[in-house]
Amino acid sequence: MSQIKCECGHLNQEGTQVCEACGNPIGEYNESTKLLDMKYEGVARRSQTYTTTMIDKVWMFFSSVKVGIWIIVITLIASSLGTIYPQEMYIPGGVSPTEHYEAEYGFTGKLYYELGLHNLYGTWWYMLLVAALGVSILIASIDRFFPLYRALKNQRVSKHRNFLKRQRLYGYTEVNHVDEKLQTINKKLKQKKYKIREENGNVLAEKNRFARWGPYVNHIGLIIFLIGCMLRYFPGMYVDDHMWIREGETAEVPHTDGQFHVENEQFIIEVYDEENELYREALNRAEGAIASNYQTNAVLYERQDTGIIGDNAELVEIERYPIRVNEPLTFSGFSLYQMDYKLNELSSMSFTLENKETGEQFGQLDVDLSSPQAVYDLGEGYYVEIREYFQDFYLNNNVPSTRSNVPNNPVFIFDMYTPDTPEGEVSFVGIQTNLEPLGENEYKMSFVDLETNHVTALVLRKDYTFPLLIIGGVIFMIGLIQGSYWAHRRIWFQQIDNEFIIAGHTNKNYLSLRKDIDEILEGTTIPSPVDQLENEEEEKEITN
């Protein structure tokens, strides 16, 4: 960046409006009589100085506050779209998303799924929006922070008269015995915790400069927070999954590559006592039992290699733990939380093959509803094949279909083979359903019995990004407090051509600064400076 030399001898970067050292307005800004724009101390910013190359244009684009606000608005609108219907991770386990959204929400649900909004926060374009927001915050901060830091660091005590008279608070007068009055002023400034610098009989009183960095601390916190959010979509950094385990069943823990398994040894549910007067009123309002505790007595296993080639790995018990709400089982960076349960889920159904005419039965089929066999051999030439199995049966445009992999409404299409019917007969069987879709049969499948089981729903979580989110949030709050509860204040006391000049600037709350100056000048016979902005507004009103 080329440099411009001020009449005071200080070298300023091209594009500087106010000399970083003496404060004298440079170039066309020197000819104006308007109050100085002190937002960034009139320093040169790259985004406003160099705009020719492609890099300059990209830098200028992302450093714009308007662009940053639009990115935030677009990101918020996109985020709200993901809340219209539940995200895929929150739909019931074992349910096909393709069918779930259409079945639950109709055409709009189907459109929601086809547009990819069911998994919005992991899509490439949403991640691109988050990245663009982070880039905008980073570039905007760099574009403003370093020039502002340099200007505040280089500022001199003695300022050019043009700088002083173009401050919002400005006043001048002739004063006798200046040194004595300055001693009184300095004493009061110290009482008000101002940091005082003196040069050639001039004084600069400054307070709370750290408040100027509040927005940049905010930006650092936001950037760390956004990095944490983006890391959630990197493998191994964040896991939020769920698993349904039936009582007595052992299942592989997802995202562990088969290293860990968990067994639902027993599921326990306890309800509030209806006879207890403390709970009677609440139970009456609820019109039913309310669970006081539900837990999974879990057994955690770890797969260990036996070291024998071709031998299966062995599951070794690691821990037994009662998983309750907010009392997870924690292992290897993962945590298993108790989330939900389902009582008396169908686990198996029993049927017999029966001759319709004679009523004679030829063996019993015990069908495991979670993993049924393909063929059931009943002996002596009698056997049954399962042609189709619909765990959660419903008719989709008169076509048999299943809503999910959960056996809420199991229906089977059986092929029955006997010595009398070697070509087989077809039977359509479910709960309170026994149809013969291809014509009348000689044999039928008769329902005998069913068994139920309790099922527990566990949530698996692992979050290595959480510390980043906490750190980012804490830093953001520090910056928010830093920039909200303090104000950077400066007061100049200067002698120029037998005149005693007072000028004041703050980045906010000028009334409080004026109060400080009035109290400091009290008893010195020096008049307080006037608010030139108020005078300008009054003149405009008179003119209009």
Image (cartoon, rainbow, N blue to C red):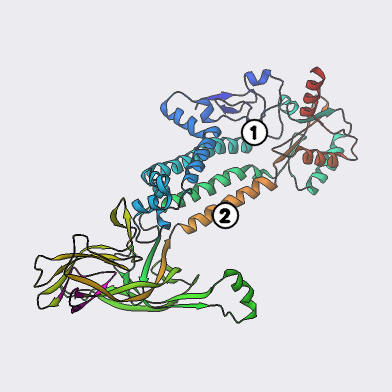
- Farthest bottom residue? 275
Look at 78% across and 25% down and name the residue there.
Answer: 537
Q: Which residues are magenta?
A: 353-377
SS of the residue at dot 1? loop
Q: Is residue 105 above or below residue 412?
A: above
Q: Which three-letter amino acid code belongs to the residue tagged 1?
A: Lys
In front of the other: 272 or 165: 272
Task: Provide the residue designation for mark 1.
Answer: 39
In front of the other: 337 or 56: 337
Task: Provide the residue designation for mark 2.
Answer: 474
How many numbered discs? 2
In front of the other: 495 or 194: 194
Q: Which three-letter amino acid code belongs to the residue tagged 2?
A: Val
Q: Position of residue 20 (x, y in %)?
A: 62, 31
| Residue 33 placement: quadrant | top right
Q: State the mark number for residue 388.
A: none
In front of the other: 124 or 199: 124
Q: How dense is the environment of label 1, judged by Cα within 10 Å: few (below 14), some, or many (20 and up)?
A: few
Q: Is residue 99 above or below residue 496?
A: below
The quarter of the picture where the C terminus appears is top right
Drawn side of residue 277 relative to residue 63, left or right:
right
Q: Tell me which numbered mark, 2 or 1, is placed earlier along the sequence.
A: 1
Q: Is residue 78 above or below residue 239?
A: above
Residue 383 visible to an observer of this rendering: yes
Q: Position of residue 524 (x, y in %)?
A: 89, 38
Nearer the observer: mark 2 or 1; the answer is: 2
